[in-house]
Image: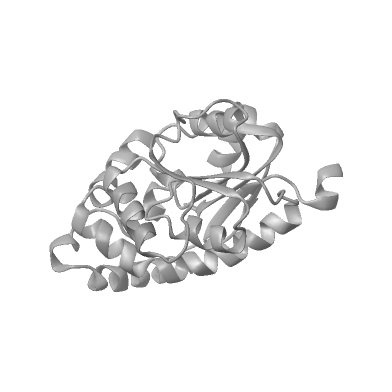
Amino acid sequence: MADARQRSEEGPIRDPLFVEHYWRVSWRPAKLAARWVAVKMRKLGVPPTARVLDIGCGPAWLTHFLWLRFPTMRFYALDASEPMIMQARKGSSSHSGDAPSGFVVGDGCWLPFRAKRFDLIISGATLHHVSDPVAFFDEVDRALADGGHVIIADVNRDVSRLLWPLVVVADWIERRLRPAATRNLGEGFVASYRAAYGAEEIQRFLKQSSLGRRVRHYPRALQHWIQTPEGKEKDT
């Protein structure tokens, strides 16, 4: 079931026309997301010289905006889609100033980095593309330094009937904004939510993985996130 979910979404993230369009329209939500992640990073106490990995970076807007907020950190952006990474590199070269430390084509279930490499690993709207979440979580745990932190956010399959019309309308609007040739490609809000995992699935995957001992799972109405505990939560 999980593998079928992944295959249903592979087309758009590898289509150069869609990728360029996605780069042009995704900067604003990425900038808002960066504010949220930055607050989390400060609460978690991520050190100012941290190595940070963004798994499933897409066009790497989130990586870019976080780097602007934390310029002394070293950021690495990884995505399984080569066109996404090519667009991220191209986009980064158009920004003023320096760029994040590295852009890498790679699989989140087989990270091309040594063990305990990163002080913070983030991932946004990526988990629903992953066919083996346990392997993904195990790799995050392997690449994470002792005392390191995790912030993973994704859409929640357990959307109520009351909220589902919002997903459908958002999907319709997003498709109308695309170049005409890409409107029928599989990726979209509806496809993403249908490919996503529910709260019980995420909890089961975490229990089966080595990462589960380090993190907490926070399910919400439209999304859920997984992160290392903050402050007093560490003792509860």
x 41%, y 67%: residue: 27
The image shows residue 148 at horizontal and vertical percentages of 69, 39
The image shows residue 202 at horizontal and vertical percentages of 56, 41
Q: Nearer the viewer, residue 73 or 226?
A: 73
| Coloring applied to the structure | one colour
Left or right, residue 210 beside residue 88: right
Question: Does residue 152 appear anywhere in the picture?
Answer: yes
Q: Nearer the viewer, residue 89 or 109?
A: 89
Question: Residue placed farthest to the front in the image?
Answer: 97
The image shows residue 230 at horizontal and vertical percentages of 77, 51
- Quadrant (top left/top right/bottom left/bottom right) for the C terminus: top right
Left or right, residue 120 beside residue 100: right
Instruction: Please tell me in which quadrant of the rendered image residue 102 appears.
Output: top left
Question: Does residue 236 appear anywhere in the picture?
Answer: no
Instruction: Please tell me in which quadrant of the rendered image residue 96 appears.
Output: bottom left
Left or right, residue 209 beside residue 215: left
Q: Nearer the viewer, residue 109 or 23?
A: 23
Q: How many marks?
A: 0
Left or right, residue 186 beside residue 148: left
The image shows residue 118 at horizontal and vertical percentages of 61, 37
x 19%, y 58%: residue: 17
Q: Nearer the viewer, residue 7 or 34?
A: 34
Question: Residue placed farthest to the left in the image?
Answer: 181
x 75%, y 51%: residue: 45
- Quadrant (top left/top right/bottom left/bottom right) for the N terminus: top left
